[in-house]
Image: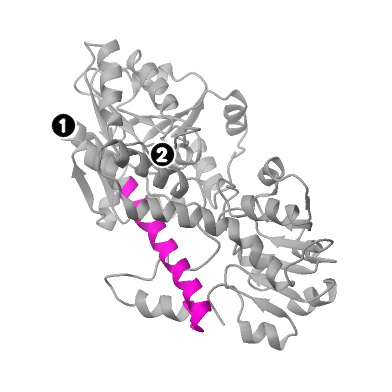
Amino acid sequence: MVKAAGARYLRPTDEGQVSMRVAMIGTGYVGLVSGACFADFGHDVTCVDKDPSKIERLERGEIPIFEPGLDDLVAANVRGGRLSFALDGAEAIRAADAVFIAVGTPSRRGDGHADLSYVHAAAEEIAGLIEGFTVVVTKSTVPVGTGDEIERIIRERRPDADFAVVSNPEFLREGAAIEDFKRPDRVVVGTEDARAQAVMRELYRPLNLNETPILFTGRRTSELIKYAANAFLAMKITFINEMADLCEAVGADVQQVARGIGLDKRIGGKFLHAGPGYGGSCFPKDTLALVRTAADAGSPVRLIETTVRINDARKKAMAGRVANVLGGDLKGKTVALLGLTFKPNTDDMRDAPSLDVAPALIAMGAEVQAFDPEGMHEAAKLLDGVRFKDGPYEAVTGADVVVILTEWDQFRALDIDRIKLLMRQPVMVDLRNVYRPEEMRTRGFRYASIGRA
């Protein structure tokens, strides 16, 4: 079907919804999940990427990231003819009702600002290709004012173009991304253009069944909502980690403290789990970018600045906790790490605590052997000197201490008696509070955890 300027909606679906054409620029975590979910909503989606190997893998049915359920979702929508992949996005962009920018915005080396080079390159490409009224949607996490710059880039190159630039931040949790996309707490859309609002409502119409609130705001407000949300959650994690340290000092139990305050509906229980510090693709870079944005605007965010400093220091301090349980000396000792990714149900190693913990342990003279269900391929590129094992029991064999770094489900029900027999000495440092202290001591383990006596 050829789209005409002004009237570009496509065929109605069986449910009466209008099917739209979507071009998704970027097939990383956000782009691939969003593209597959929009296709599952009934839209016609083409995911575009400049990496030939990534497109080749996707066309073979191979998913380049680990996300539960994503392989089946992609396969079903490819079979249904709603989802396709392309190295050259020209045709898809020309045909699109909405073009999503879902490229990476990593921290810029040296100053912590978000690197927008991929976003700007995508805007340049889109500018030369759009036909008829097109909604250009920023799905990538970008600083306040980026939408203005995207609009300037497109307008400068194509003064005649009929388009609107919209902010539509993602709020996907790795490991639960499909559920988060299809049953979100809210959808935030930053635009005051009535035609763009109509397109965005149509794209998200299936969520009406769940009565999902769609919050329309100004574009800059939408951009800030994303950063503010991640910064607040990062601050909440850092708060409970500091309470955990206080609990250890005064003989209290951080899990009971978290439950006691989390039952207050004004606070809520989510993100009140003490541990070795936050990592991942969002919180570290987004908190840092917000700090830089606020500083540039002359309105510093002191709470977030402190959050960043505390979290960085916490991850670096975790190796010391391991050393302390063995009397402070790790020379000649073998440490088994269970879990390397920043959280379970992902293969994402970005800013994972293990990237601080493992090198620090090795620097203290320890031999480190490790296992992670999904992250070892990525970890092998980032961690020198670590011996990777085929399973948790192989990892603990001959170890002087086992450290739980990531709370994968398979680490929640380990055969503790078997582990005790395999280890050189029964010592566990549980940085995720998976096990009960009294039970571990009854089983003969020297046991240390976070914020519990």
**Observer-nearest residue: 433 or 314?**
314
Seen in the picture, residue 326 relative to 150 is either above or below; the reply is below
> Is 91 placed left or right of 409 in the picture?
left
- Residue drawn at (25%, 42%) of the image: 222
Residue that numbered label 2 is attached to: 39
- Tell me the amino acid under the disc marked 2: Ala
Which x, y percent locates residue 353? 59, 55
Which x, y percent locates residue 306? 40, 55
> Mark 2 packing: few (<14 Cα in 10 Å), some, or many (20+)?
many
User: Is residue 29 visible in this depiction of the protein?
Assistant: yes
Q: Main secondary structure of the magenta part?
A: helix
Which residues fall within the magenta stretch? Answer: 227-254
Seen in the picture, residue 341 relative to 135 is either above or below; the reply is below
Q: Mark 1 or mark 2: name the one nearer the start of the chain.
A: 2
- Residue drawn at (25%, 27%) of the image: 148
Real-space CA distance between mark 1 and mark 2, rounded to the nearest whole angstrom: 25 Å
Element type at marker 2?
Answer: helix
Element type at marker 1?
Answer: loop
- Residue drawn at (50%, 26%) of the image: 49
Picture quadrant where residue 170 is located:
top left
Residue that numbered label 1 is attached to: 193
- Residue drawn at (25%, 24%) of the image: 8
Which x, y percent locates residue 377? 70, 44
> Is 90 placed left or right of 417 in the picture?
left
User: Is residue 175 visible in this depiction of the protein?
Assistant: no
Seen in the picture, residue 155 relative to 442 is either above or below; the reply is above
- Tell me the amino acid under the disc marked 1: Asp
